[in-house]
Image: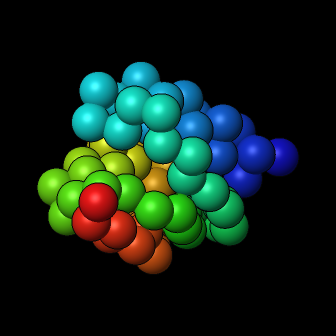
Amino acid sequence: MVDMQLMDRARSALERSPHLANKRLKLEARQGRLILRGTVASYYQKQMAQETLRKLDGVEEIENHLQVHWR
């Protein structure tokens, strides 16, 4: 249950981030570890996604597997 709560909080935080508007990112949560997957348009967005998640209570580790796709 704790993993689902963390994932819900993480998803909400990403949706509120102005740097990640309209991005469909995939999240997994396992025992304090968040795994982030998907595609963003810049390395800045990749970093901002990680920084947004790092601030959440209960996050012990982040695996940032976001891919940058230049358009």
Nearest the viewer among 10 and 69 is: 69
Reply above or below: 25 against 62: above
Q: Position of residue 33 (x, y in %)?
A: 55, 67
Report the number of discs.
Answer: 0
* Res 18 seen here: yes
* Res 33 seen here: no
Q: Position of residue 56 (x, y in %)?
A: 41, 41
Q: Name the quadrant containing residue 64.
A: bottom left
| Residue drawn at 40 percent across, 31 percent down | 21
| Residue drawn at 66 percent across, 36 percent down | 8
Nearest the viewer among 13 and 25 is: 25
In the orientation shown, which residue stands out farthest toward the left? 44
User: 11 left or right of 65?
Assistant: right
| Residue drawn at 41 percent across, 24 percent down | 16
Q: Name the quadrant containing residue 19.
A: top left
| Residue drawn at 29 percent across, 60 percent down | 71
Q: Position of residue 40 (x, y in %)?
A: 37, 57
